[in-house]
């Protein structure tokens, strides 16, 4: 399942002060567990018109129950800094693995001070056929 989390719009001054190490992703599932598949997120940068400028994959690690952080937040910031003159928005996309055949996954991007930047949830139902993929979440 793809899931997009909009973090914030970016300006030069806000980007220079941005500390990605304070952000984390929380996943919870009404039945079973939900994890970020392969501990990989895709971060995409968008221009003012909403067009994708660039995307790249980055690793995350599970640092607490249901919580994930970027493995190299400074590396992500260094990568993104090349696009500061054209980037207006940053989005995180990742696939989710679940241990149950149906449920509701709640997702939140938060800061270490407890501020929730973005949160949403979606319901899913997997087929009993092992060769049928998860449905894509729509947003």
Image (cartoon, rainbow, N blue to C red):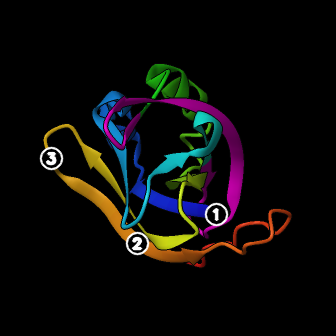
Q: What residue appears at the point 56 percent right and 62 percent down from the top-left corner?
A: 3
Tell me which label, 2 or 1, sits earlier in the chain: 1
Q: 126 above or below 36? A: below
Residue displayed at 33% across by 62% down: 118
Q: Position of residue 20 (x, y in %)?
A: 37, 33
Disc 1 from disc 3: Cα separation: 26 Å
Name the residue beneath numbered marker 2.
Answer: 121
Q: Is residue 16 left or right of residue 37?
A: left
Q: Do tag 1 and tag 3 residues touch (Cβ < 8 Å)?
A: no
Q: Magenta segment, which residues?
A: 44-68
Judged left or right of residue 73, residue 26 is left
Name the one closer to the observer, 21 or 85. Answer: 21
The alpha-carbon separation of the residues under discs 2 and 1 comes to 12 Å
Residue found at the far right of this picture: 131
The percent position of residue 15, horizontal first and vertical second, equals 39, 38
**How far from the left and from the top, in percent, is residue 120?**
37, 70
Residue 10 higher or lower than 119, as above or below: above
- Distance of mark 3 from mark 2, alpha carbons? 18 Å
Quarter of the figure that contains the N terminus: bottom right
Q: Is residue 56 left or right of residue 32?
A: right
Residue, disc 1: 1
Residue position marked by numbered label 3 in the rendering: 114
Mark 3 or 2, which is nearer the eye?
Answer: 2
- Circle 3 packing at 10 Å, graded few (<14), some (14-19), many (20+), is few
């Amino acid at each position: 399942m793809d899931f997009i989390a909009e973090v914030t719009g970016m300006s030069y001054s806000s980007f220079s002060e941005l500390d990605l190490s304070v952000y984390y992703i929380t996943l919870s599932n009404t039945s079973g567990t939900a994890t970020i598949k392969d501990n990989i997120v895709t971060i995409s940068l968008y221009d003012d018109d909403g067009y994708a400028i660039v995307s790249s994959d980055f690793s995350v690690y599970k640092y607490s129950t249901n919580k994930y952080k970027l493995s190299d937040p400074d590396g992500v910031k260094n990568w993104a800094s090349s696009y500061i003159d054209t980037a207006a928005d940053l989005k995180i996309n990742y696939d989710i693995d679940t241990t149950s055949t149906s449920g509701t996954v709640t997702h939140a991007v938060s800061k270490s001070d407890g501020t929730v930047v973005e949160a949403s949830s979606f319901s899913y139902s997997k087929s009993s056929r092992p060769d049928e993929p998860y449905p894509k979440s729509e947003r």
